[in-house]
Amino acid sequence: MAAMAPPAEVPSYFLCPISLQLMRDPVTLPTGISYDRAAISRWLAASATPAACSTSQRTCPVTRQPLEPELQLTPNHTLRRLIGSWVASVSPGSDVEGEVAALRPVRRDELASLLSDAAEAQVGALRKLGELVAECEDTRAMLESQDGVFDALSRVLTGATACSTAREEAVGVLASLRIPEQDLVRVVSRHGNLAESLTAVLRSSNLQSRAQAMRLVRSLADVSVPAWVIGLNQELLAEVIRVVRDRVSTRATKAALHALSALCPYGRNRVKIVGAGAVPALVELLLDEPERRVCELALAVLDRLCTCAEGRAELVAHAAGVVVLGKKVLRVSEAASERAVRVLRSVARHAATPAVLQEMAQAGVVGKLCLALRSELCGVKTKEKAHEVLKLHSRIWRSSPCLSPKFLALYPS
């Protein structure tokens, strides 16, 4: 009688340090530690929420070393191949068969069958697709190569028969896929109610669905299909701004700001965005001292909105509008300083009432502009704009009792 083989054991280095499960899609952090993509993505998303950010910064779960906000996950192809080879060697019926079953690659015909069920708005199939795409890069690429996948999922989102849960699951899958520009254009042209459907998902109480819908809106805005972009209704824009106001997640906030920035070049949209409450939402976001990239994006959107009279009027009407701009000069980054000074120049040129000029002096904005002239943290263009603003109202500010002698000494003659 042949001796029985010892029961297989999962090598410890194949297990994700977070989930303690076999890694399906191993990725490596800059700290050198590898995790399963789905597990570390959830960890990073949780630590990026406003509640988490108020108490600690994002860290590597194992080493506790701080991580950069703009972190990129690096696929660990070597570890993935080793896991794949080990999975293939596991005999059916072994003690670890249950653990490795989920790692066996999905066949193309299985994925096609799942997509067919998903296209019929079956919630279970849509949810399974979302899980497979999130867990494995190869499965995502395989799904992206399926004929008509983007149109099929968009039909679920925009169709009249699908339930709200099916629509949210469809948005989640679409947001996870890399949709080529030509396919995005095709989706927009075929589904005239796409904006209304995305608005409905953005109004959901499910924060994850709202974040996913926001990423999809950003992709559509980046493509800038004129007929879709110019025809956007105020309801969708209001929901995009509500994502900023509600701090759904850092990633969702960035997507919302990117979308607003991409929509701003169209003059009619700027007025719509201002009318939907963007300016106070952006000012309040800046007051919360967000991370560097969020601050830069918020200032970039404000800069574009303040090229129209409605945007400038909303900014100066906000009690902290001018003040927060002054605070961002020389405190965040060179890019943030340039954007803040650009907005202040728009105000100084086109909305400089006596009250606004007095506020700029009292709040220290004029002093900040004087410091920017001599600072190595500001580029040439920023200094030129600061100089222009100071010269524009030198008669009033030079005689202001709010300007200290040290700033008067820096004031351009």
Image: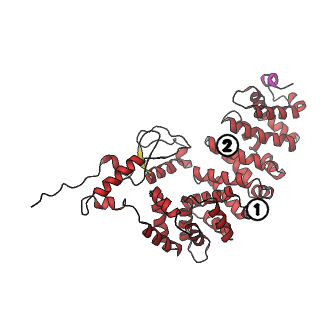
> In the orientation shown, which residue stands out farthest toward the right?
395
Q: Nearer the viewer, residue 364 or 411?
A: 411
Which residue is disc 2 drawn over?
296
Distance of label 2 from label 1 (alpha carbons): 25 Å
Which residue is disc 1 drawn over?
230
Dominant secondary structure of the residues highlighted in magenta in the image = helix
The disc labelled 1 sits on which kind of residue? Ile
In percent of width and height, residue 369 lies at 77, 32
Numbered circles on residues, count: 2
In percent of width and height, residue 27 lies at 44, 48
In percent of width and height, residue 212 lies at 57, 59
Q: Residue at x 67, y 68 (%)?
A: 196
The disc labelled 2 sits on which kind of residue? Glu
Q: Residue at x 45, y 66 (%)?
A: 128
Q: Residue at x 48, y 74 (%)?
A: 117
Mark 1 burial class by Cα count in 10 Å: few <14, some 14-19, many 20+: some
Q: Is residue 387 left or right of residue 166?
A: right
- Quadrant of the frame with the N terminus: bottom left
Quarter assignment of residue 412 = top right
Q: Are marks 2 and 1 in contact (CB under 8 Å)?
A: no
| Mark 2 element type | helix
Q: Which residues are magenta?
A: 404-413
Q: Is residue 406 magenta?
A: yes
- Eye-nearest disc, 2 or 1: 1
Q: Is residue 370 left or right of residue 25?
A: right
Mark 2 burial class by Cα count in 10 Å: few <14, some 14-19, many 20+: many
